[in-house]
Image (tube, coloured by chain):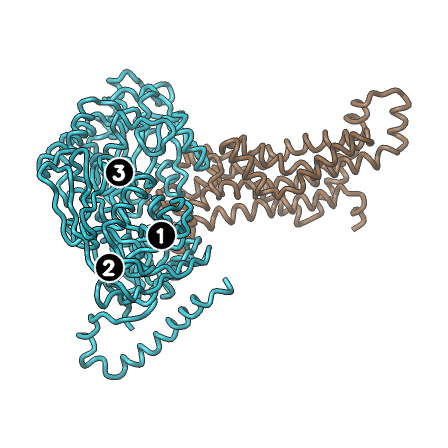
Amino acid sequence: MVDHPPLNKISRRTALALPLGLAALSGTIFSNGFAKADEPVRGGTMVMIVQPEPSTLAHYAVTAGNIPPIATQIYEGLVTYDWDQNPQPNLATSWETAPDGKSITFKLREGVVFHNGKRFTSADVQFSVMEILKKYHPFAPLLLAELTGVDTPDEMTAVLRLANPAPYLMKGLAGRDLPIMCKSVFEGTQILQNASANKPIGTGPFKFGQWDRGQFVRLDRNDKYWKPGLPYLDHIIARFIPDAATRSAALETGEAHFAGYSAVNYADLARMKTNPILDTTMKGYEMTPALSVLELNAKHPPLDKKEVRQAIAYAIDRKVILRDVMYGYGKPATGPLSSLFKTVGFYTDDVRKYDVPDRLDIANKLLDGAGLPRGANGMRFGMHLEVNSFGEQWLRQAEYLKQALAIVGIDLTLRSEDTATWLRRVYTDYDYDINEPFLSQGVDPVYGLNKQYLTSQIRKGVTFVNDSFYANPEFDGILNEAMREQDHDKRAVLYKKAQQILAEDCPLVWLIDVQYVSVFNRKLRDHTTGPLGTQQAFERAWLET
Amino acid sequence: MWQGFARFARNRMALFGAAVLLCLLLLVVLTPVIYPDDPFKLAGPALQPPGGSFLLGTDTLGRDVAAEIAYGARTSLIVGVGATLAAIVIGAVAGGVAGYYRGMTETVLMRITEFFQTIPAFIFALLIVAILSPSVSSEIIAIAAVSWPSIARLVRGEFVSLGGREFVQACAGLGASDARIIFNHMLPNCASSIIAVGSLLIGTAILLEAGLAFLGLGDPNVMSWGLIISAGRAVLRSAWWICTFPGVAILLTVLGINLIGDGLNEALNPRLRER
């Protein structure tokens, strides 16, 4: 922690800013200052906490939640999204889907240049999508499955050709999911070994400056950004602080301005809310739905019986998990889709409800009915629960689950192993009864539902796919139809049906609809400007002086 | 030996240690009576401060901290005593054989012992538990595996010094078997040193166990002091009691055991008798 001049400079500057600001306050500012306080100010350095430090900045080849907060400042997408999740012009100025849904034509923005000075054209779109993302992006087998090619009739027009209609594609065109790279940087090189992997070159409001491993990434203002007058900030520093208590302290002392994605311990949030220089927001995660769930291995009796799986779903009091494990952030999950999909009309809670007042009676009846009477010790049968190794909140949840299931006579034994062993046991060896993962659902039901429940997604050795052996041809048919249906309302009807079938068959137990939280310094303004929150550019963020 | 215990009883610090250990044993014996329920049971509202309906308050899930500590004491003692006994058996055999036969046997056994001593104990224990998957028995194995070298070196040293003594040579001269000489004559003669060092090992083993559980490598189905502290760490600034009381329990137990160990050492070690 000795030799990083940029950081020293910053803390000194922030330390100076406070007394100066107070001096100004005592003077004239009360007369007309506050009206002006909402006018953005140019300059300043924003410090954001990113946790944990990314292992790479190769945003086009690796999906990890800690990469986009940095990478989306540099790489932009064809569109951005407004608060209603409608696409808005960005690198593309307009777009049109063909009547048969098998092609989307994008008109591109003139006058955009990459950080290396190269002009942005349709060739960059074609190369990024076909040669980089389609080949190397982990989501490509889903997001770009129908994509057959990109035509470039002229320099400012790109046409995405599709084998079948892919209406979900319009939700995944932001910089987070479909970043646009510079063709001349990658052409003729090994994509994954490209020099720009950790020195990204894009069109975004900030340029890559420096990465001091273990300390920070510095991003510098792109003076040639295509949005006139933007960005307001001179620099963004992404700091990496492994210790949770130190992260909280950095925010509380004003050393850091922003921490997204629950980089702050939920347990500390109550205290931070009473800090006058800090505020919190739950906005900016509308397109980042996630559920915590229990996966039930249907190959392990008696979990092959629907009644037993339903009884487990009834036996759990989600409010206790929400209150005591998640510190109140989130809501009880009602079914297989996050309630965030309500905005776009795909979510329904008109399904079998497990959070009902007489749930314990129902659970006991179901287990009795399944031919599993209580033995001498009050237990019906024993099962192992694999404890999620991504943090200790999951051990707390496991401890609660053991208590909750004991009430209905299911004797859980907890098994905690290191991450590699745990993932191999669950997704490769299938040597588990109950697993407690955390599932990101992506921007469209296609991502969350298809990979988790389709029969074709029972893929030995692939993590976070269908490992509960759910196989329902009727359900598969509905999902495949919904994937290609272009009419939004018809899709909504199909997904409603899909959710009802899943809730009834209960291949998984859905626990908590997760809510992330951002903590920010009140001096930092306009930081969360859309539903992608920390995973989109901070070009309009500015610091009060 | 009995004179030794009389000398032990005159040592006030050692008596204090013995009193602490007695209280702990009493707690372990009475736990099923005082707290008949599972210590993992959600007993009441979460994060109740101590002094209300729960003597030592409740933790983040609403479990009774007092009950958790009582059950944790049992785990600590089982692991502490179990690991120490295992370490003594392995160490005494390795050290005894090396010290009795000398020569090549000694060289090989002592190099193995030193090899184990060069690996940082806690990290080695972490590795063993991670490989065996966390449970009480794997904790005992791991802690025994990192504790036996000190016993082995001690026993070897004692055997080397005993080996030239007349009573040992007399036994050999009378045709006693090696096993008889080792177990009936030599081991009893270094029992006092083993007891003194072994009692100190129990304290170390309890600390190691708490450390393993704190890092999430304890048996998740068994309550332990380290587990309570690791669960309460996140709320340390708002609910001090969750970490504090098990911390105090660890402190008192390890202190008590170390005082007993020191007392035994002074009482049984002839070189320290005159003090």
Which of the marked residues, 3 or 2, is nearer the chain's N terminus? 2
Colour used to depict chain B in the structure image: brown
Q: Which mark is residue A112?
A: 2
Name the outermost residue toward the bottom: A27
Check whether the beta carbons of the residues at disc 1 and disc 2 lie within 8 A of each other.
no
Give the Cα separation between the discs numbered 3 and 2.
49 Å
Q: Which mark is residue A318?
A: 3
* Left or right placement of residue B233 versus residue A277 in this view: right
Question: Which chain is disc 3 placed on?
Answer: A
Check if mark 3 and mark 2 are on a common chain: yes
The one nearer the camera, B170 or A254, is: A254
Question: Which chain is disc 1 placed on?
Answer: A
Neighbours of disc 2 within 10 Å: few (<14), some (14-19), many (20+): some
* Left or right placement of residue A350 versus residue B222 in this view: left
Check whether the beta carbons of the residues at disc 3 and disc 1 lie within 8 A of each other.
no
Residue bearing mark 1: A185
Residue appearing at x 27%, y 39% in the figure: A291
- Tell me residue A160's x, y (percent): 19, 42
| Amino acid at circle 2 | Val
Check if mark 1 and mark 2 are on a common chain: yes
* Left or right placement of residue B176 versus residue A454 in this view: right
Residue appearing at x 85%, y 21% in the figure: B176
Check whether the beta carbons of the residues at disc 3 and disc 2 lie within 8 A of each other.
no
- Tell me residue B272's x, y (percent): 78, 47
In the image, the chain rendered in cyan is A
Front tag of 3 and 1 = 1
The one nearer the camera, A389 or A406, is: A389
Check if mark 3 and mark 1 are on a common chain: yes
Residue appearing at x 20%, y 70% in the figure: A38
